[in-house]
Amino acid sequence: MNSEKYIGLDVHQATIMVAVMDSSGKLVMESILEMKAATILQFFAGLRGTLWVTFEEGTCAAWLYDLLEAHVAQLVVCNPRKNALLKYGNKSDRIDARKLAELLRGNHLKAVYHGESGVRTLRELARSYITTIKDLTRVMSRLKALYRSWAIPCAGRDVYYTRHRAEWLGKIKHAGVRRRAEQLYQHLDVPYLGPIRSALLVALIQTPHRFRTKRQLWAYSGLALETRTSTEYRYVEGQLRRSKKLLSIRGLNKDHNHDLKALFKAASITASGHPGPFQDFYQALLGKGMKPTMARLTLARKIAAITLTLWKKGESFDAEKLKPQAA
């Protein structure tokens, strides 16, 4: 007798709706659990057989994954963007939990990586850093917008520096506007965390072995091209043939880690502007007639590919091995 059970969890802030199915797809149990560790573990301790569990990625996903990982045979944190079947038909907590259990039983779920708990502290620090940088970028944009709104030219970066602050504030004659600028400057006084791109890579990727090839890393980082084709086949004199000219739409994939894409993009911009092998690589691409935007994308892919290879092998970067050829 097959003792496998497929469990779908519809997770909310205060409760979890649970649906349990057997290997034949029969619903054998439903329950509503309070969002407490002791209650959740007590429920799973009362289940028998091989337990397969799934729930969608969300606010509590990391906490719930760490709680259940050691108590079930297989745990899948699924990508809600890929669960299109949940959007069809009636919707409720009970229906969603049943659909998740059914999709898990049919192996139709796209998993979100949650494998490395050892870098959890680093990941939280990285999120704090990324949030701080985004907030500071918004403040800098608002500060320049304030000066421009009063017809004060503010090109360049001098407007941000502490040593020029009194000079720039003196250009604002209105007391209320000057006070607003002072408050924006106070936001800029958050201590700078320094260049920690390597640490961010570890926090965001966790382990290089989750990517079999560089193309999988490109897709995860938003650097891969997606091609959508239509009308691939047609009949010619009664014979099925594939069209030689396919109608296709190309573009960068949208479902990706935006923080990682921004990291590789920033690294490519920095590398292309400083003398060295990466700048030579970038200039060689431009020399072949490639547009600057596509050249920077190719350079970002090159940096990502080298990072993945060296990380897997545990080696250091050797600039002499970098040749100016397309990635």
Image: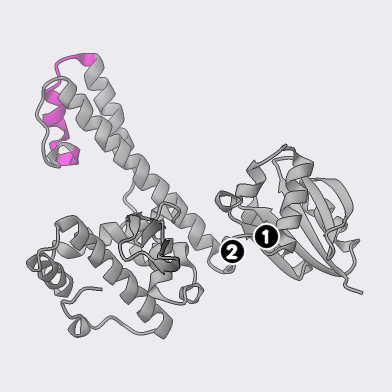
For the residue pair 86 and 35, the one nearer the viewer reads as: 86
What range of the chain is rendered magenta?
Answer: 160-175
Which residue, given by chain and number where applicable, does mark 2 sit on?
Answer: 114
Q: Position of residue 178 (x, y in %)?
A: 22, 21
For disc 2, the neighbor class at 10 Å (few under 14, some 14 to 19, many from 20) is some
For the residue pair 63 and 97, the one nearer the viewer reads as: 97
Looking at the rendered structure, the secondary structure element under dot 1 is: helix
Determine the image quadrant of residue 284: bottom left
For residue 65, which numbered disc appears in the image? 1
Residue 174: in magenta span: yes
How far apart, in angstroms, are the residues tagged by discs 2 and 1? 8 Å
Residue 149: in magenta span: no
Residue 34 appears left or right of 207: right
- Amino acid type, mark 2: His
Which quadrant is home to the N terminus? bottom right
Q: Answer yes or no: do the residues labelled 2 and 1 have beta carbons within 8 Å? A: yes
- Residue at the image position 60 percent from the left and 62 percent from the top: 111
